[in-house]
Amino acid sequence: MSAVAAADEIVFSRPFRAPGEFANLVEVLRSDHAHGDGGFTRRATARLRAVTGARDALLTTSCTHALELAGLLLGLRAGDEVVLPSFTFPSAATAVVARGATPVFADLDPATGNADPASVAESLTPRTRAVVVMHYGGVPVDLGAVGALCGPQGIALVEDNAHGLGGSAGDRMLGSAGVLATQSFHDTKNVHCGEGGALLVNDPALVRRAEIIREKGTNRARFLRGEVHRYTWLDEGSSYLPSELNAAVLDAQLAAFDTIQGLRHRVWNVYAAGLAAWARDTGVRLMSEQPGLEHTAHLFWLLLPDAGRREAMLRHLHDRGVRAAFHYVPLDTSPAGERFGRRIRPLSATAEFASRLVRLPLWPGLAPAQIERVLEAVTSFDPWSTAADRPRVQARATISR
Ligand SMILES: *Cc1c(COP(=O)(O)O)cnc(C)c1O
């Protein structure tokens, strides 16, 4: 049992409420238009294009649905293969399996948790139709290396940009590099509307068909713009558009984007500075700034020396009222991954990273005193306290900050 009263617990994630959300919701509820593709959808979409630099954007009901829409749009079918990291959210794989195609799992780069371009390269075959990358924690994947594997071979690069909203690599904004990119606006993401998502479309040749698939296979989007007199069934499709209620919240969130990001980076920077000495002394590895890359402060991670010490640290934090977490059971060794997917070889970097990872609470409303408590809880943990295998270099280390 935790020694800390429930009210004093520092939760792992808490949604930010943007100033305009209530007024926007009232406006929708007082109007006669709560279904999709109204004024708030148009406004939120324009803001999203500005934040991502994407050519076109379509709001969806989730990132999962945006990935499914992408699978339909790319015409994936049985026999096709899609290379994606094993260390990611399952939706990138279920969208492939939904088309009857095969996910092929790539290993990760332990410096970032992102797909390792060398492993992606190894996983390509003549049947590879797409590569889906994810910018873990909003740290950009090596877009130059992965892009060079895709474009010249006619392989579609898709960015699952659920973590990467507002991130950049040099002058390249995340979400604008792939033929397609997907966003999530789930409550746990930097910008959220309960449940929501978007498909970013950077190839102009794909926009018209993306609109049709999103609207039950019809040209209703063109009808709403007054471009055709009636709408009709033209293609495959489903219903992927969110209601104006979701778009109204999303519009207010995107209007507050700079505020949200400022608050998140504040927490991230205090963690990075406050844990540096402890990490050096204990040999724990911290998520770090990468030269030339702008991350999004979506999360802050630590890598413990091994899985046992990861469990010990989570217990230690929990006892001090700090709710830390880990995630991504590797897809390649999950029951569905073994059933539907394949991999070139055992993905040892992925297995290690996933078993040693701890994520700290990171949300805009964390008060300075709470951030301080997280630092105290972390730095009072000595991963080597009961260990005979403490590395020699650690022997004289004092655990302090
Ligand atoms: C959250 C997340 C998803 C799923 O998003 P939903 O909007 O909940 O469908 C997909 N991919 C990544 C990388 C995510 O973090």
Image (tube, grey):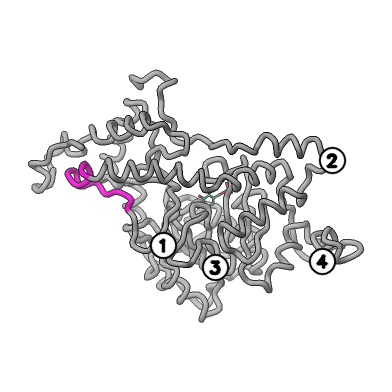
Q: Of the residues shown, which amino acid type is indicated by label 1?
A: Ala
Circle number at residue 32: 2
Looking at marks 2 and 3 on the same chain, the residue that comes earlier in the sequence is marked by 2
Label whose residue precedes the other's in the sequence (1 or 4): 1
| Image position of 208 (left or right of 285) | right
According to the picture, the residue beneath numbered tag 3 turns out to be: 178
Count of marks placed on residues = 4
Q: Is residue 66 above or below residue 119?
A: above
Please name the residue shown 72% across and 41% down the image: 245
Q: Are marks 3 and 4 in contact (CB under 8 Å)?
A: no
**What is the distance, in whole Å, between disc 1 and disc 2 at their CAs?**
46 Å
Identity, as a three-letter code, of the amino acid under mark 4: Leu
Residue to which mark 4 is pinned: 234
Which numbered tag is attached to residue 115? 1
- Quarter location, residue 360: top left
Apparent side of residue 66 relative to residue 366 in the rendered image (left or right): right
Disc on the earlier residue, 2 or 4: 2
Tag 3 or tag 1, which sits nearer the N-term? 1
Front one among 21 and 352:
21
Numbered disc 3: secondary structure: loop
Badge 3 crowding class, 10 Å Cα cut-off, few under 14, some 14 to 19, many 20 or more, is many
Rendering coords of residue 128 (x, y %): 53, 73
**Dot 1: within a 10 Å radius of its alpha carbon, few (fewer than 14), some, or many (20 or more) residues?**
many
What's the magenta region? 277-288
Disc 3 residue type? Answer: Gly
Reply yes or no: does residue 18 show up in magenta. Answer: no
